Image (cartoon, rainbow, N blue to C red):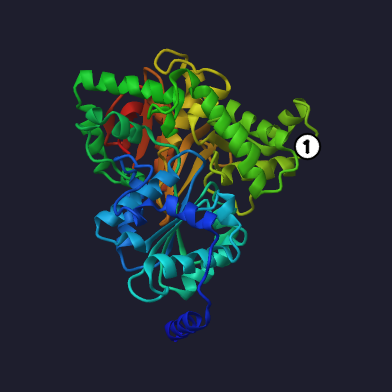
Amino acid sequence: MVQAINAFITSAEAKTREPLKLSQEVIDVLTDLNSWWAEPGLVRPSPPAYRRRPILEIENRLKGPGRLIEVLKGPRQVGKTTGLHQIIQDLMKRSVPPREILFVRFDLEVLRGVPGGLRTIAHWFADEVMKRPLGKGAEPYIFLDEVHKLRRWQEEVKHLGDTFPVRMVLTGSSSVLVARGGRESLAGRIFSTEIPPFAFREVVEAWKPALAEPLPKPRRFADAFEPGFRGAIEEINALKAQQKLALKRQLDRYFNRGGYPRLHSGEVEEDRWADYLTQTVFDNVLGADIPDLFPVQDPRLLRQVYLLVARNTGTEISQPTLTQMANSAGFQTTQPTVGRYLHYLADALLIREFRRYPLSKKASARLPAKLALSDLGVRNAIFRGAPSLWESDPVVLGPLVETLVQSVVRDHNLQVHFWRDYREPGNRKSPPVEVDFVAERADGVCLPVEVKFRRRIDAQDKAGVRLFIERFEAPQGIIVTRDLFEWDAGSRILCVPLLEFLLAF
């Protein structure tokens, strides 16, 4: 019935709608953006050959029969637009006609200002480029970059997706795409994928492919729950000493600069990387992107909250404590305001917030959460340096290594927490125990991940993971170490060196 109504609407629109006209400026911009219309196969600028795994997953879903709207969300400069160009390039290689692909960038004011918005552009594309009405023939592919900058974008996307058989891929710099638009008008119609800064394994694969050649196939983090995960770690651990030394040098660079791609591609000069990151985050994201999306009354306070998280990345801290720190720095603020700003930073995918496991029935801002920057390089850029990964005090390195580790503890349908309790539950006189990260699958099965970045690991270092496995019946536990690789079948604890752990995913 619904299909019949939509077919009727489509037919009626085609009969009654006047041919749409766009200004010559808009046509020129669209023609420039869609270079493949004039020269089939040409994508400008030409995207790199390396495909990130989330991009490949989206491509595979686009091959299928479903018509869910794909959403790529991530901060600035992590490769979202490049990913769209790669998908477009691969679609044409799969014989999708170039004139059935539309790419629109809504960070361009000239396109945001088109009367009728997306609907007008889509119909013009159908009339003048495809040469057939929407709804007739094969489904066209429509890519909308920075779509949240378009006024009432969710209504326009919903109308287009509900009325015509089209395949759509959207990008934005914030998960507000889902939080604000998706929950209401697009509920059930979208599949969301986060595009964070590059993980260490991705940096090696993209810019040091010779070093990546001997590595086993990368795993999803969900694979770490399974016994077979040990095999992947064993393969990496068995690399030749010279290969591991070269990879450690790359890890040292990644520890310092993080995963923003332009820092590894050669586009940013070696002595300007810190300036680039500071400008990208402070000027562009904190100064423009977040205030455009959210009601930020005090941008200076937003920057201060981010600085406090950067200074304390990888540690547990409560909102009241952050509020006290902000007030001590000269800001007259309140805990609810700091809490909102933390939410904005997390929504913009600049930080991650981990709650205590198991989650309480009533969330409280007074309970400490573990906070971490999404990318460690930004912290190092702000403070103009980092301790030596291999020589510094483990106490200093601990929270920074945790920030590295959390970057790969992510997957579809996976929640990540931390755990802290007493050895004897409810007995405050018994010793405290903790686990840095608890990955929880949708079925409730948990995997504890602890970071012990030191030369020697003893029984006490394993106590928290061991107790968590016993109390919550976890299949196994992981301790990320400096050098130790060991599997203890009795306790079901796998000790994995940081290098091997990051290269596994």
Q: Position of residue 439 (x, y in %)?
A: 43, 45
Left or right: residue 132 compared with residue 298? left
Question: In the picture, which quadrant includes the N terminus?
Answer: bottom left
Q: Amino acid at mark 1?
A: Thr
Question: Horizontal and vertical percent for residue 21?
Answer: 53, 67
SS category of the residue bearing label 1: loop
- The answer to whether residue 211 is visible is yes
Residue placed most toward the observer, 488 or 145? 145
Which residue is depicted at the point 33% across and 34% down?
201
**How far across and down, in percent of the image, does residue 387 sit?**
48, 16
Asked if residue 218 is positioned above or below residue 123 in the image, the reply reads above
In the displayed structure image, the side of residue 270 where residue 150 appears, left or right: right
Considering depth in this image, is 113 or 180 the residue closer to the camera? 113
The residue positioned farthest toward the front in the image shown: 24
> Of residues 247 and 427, which is closer to you in this image?
247
To which residue does mark 1 refer?
333
